[in-house]
Amino acid sequence: MVTNTDVVPLTGINAGFNCAGVTPGTCNLPSFSFGADPANACVIGGSLGAGQSCVLNVVFNPTSSSQAARNANLVVTAGGLSQTVSLTGHDSIATTAVSPTAGTTPPMNPATASTVAITGTITVTNTSTRCDAAGACTTAGIPAGYPAPSVDAGPFIPTAITLAPLTGTGTWALGGTCAVGTAINPGIAAIPANAANGTPASAYVPSGNCTVTATYTPPATCTATTTATCAGTARVTMMGYGNAGAAQPATIINRVVNAN
């Protein structure tokens, strides 16, 4: 928050990020940005009346593909004076699984072409498990094949979900429970009771998942006896922040779906 405690307007408000004085190798400017402006947001280049205040909303973005501290400075300038605020964040990393590995469930290309709308589903699961008590978490309840619990496990956050028609004259619709900006959260590892400090046991909380659906409606010319125009194809994609071992935002779905 920037507050003008003077009796005259404060002019020349400016703000930005830099790496001055930050430990070498730990500064990452893309990890920080200004978020959506609240009602009383500071206007860059603007002024602030006497006794008034405004807000700069800083967001930490998990832009890397590994767990590490990300640092930077926020520098706010107003009225010819500058103030520096140290920023730090820590990337958490998700591991994701997409099912099925190709196409959809159920397949959208039945042996006999469908003359009515047909829907296929793709499921995205965050297979990572967060450990909230380092050294005390167990693997109880975690599905086979999932990574071991980690204090660095975090959400996968979709930034784009698209469906682009490629061929055919039918219509496509994108649906499902996955949503841009809505986190697909990791599971939470079970922790046994600790008699020494009185902490009760906590059970495993399953990992989050969501769905992407593609619905294809054949054209009116598609009938049970005239199937030549029934088919259509589309490309389905999802990308987002938080996936392990990938450039961010990571693409976790990029496939062509065949209908009819």
Image (spheres, rainbow, N blue to C red):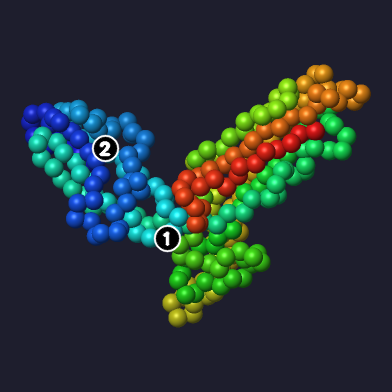
In the rendered image, which residue does mark 2 sit on?
55
In which quadrant will I find the N terminus? Answer: top left
Residue 55 percent coordinates (x, y): 26, 37
The residue nearer to you, when weighing 56 against 160, is 160
Which amino acid type is marked by label 1? Gln
Relative placement, left or right, of 184 versus 226 is left
Dot 2 alpha-carbon crowd within 10 angstroms: few under 14, some 14 to 19, many 20 or more: some
In the rendered image, the vertical position of residue 185 relative to residue 50, given as above or below: below
**Residue at 19% over, 55% down:** 21
Relative placement, left or right, of 227 versus 44 is right
**Residue at 80% over, 33% down:** 260
Residue 52 percent coordinates (x, y): 18, 32
The residue nearer to you, when weighing 158 against 187, is 158
Quadrant position of residue 202: bottom right
Residue ranking furthest to the left: 7
Give the CA distance from mark 1 to mark 2: 30 Å
Relative placement, left or right, of 197 versus 123 is left
Which mark is drawn over residue 185?
none
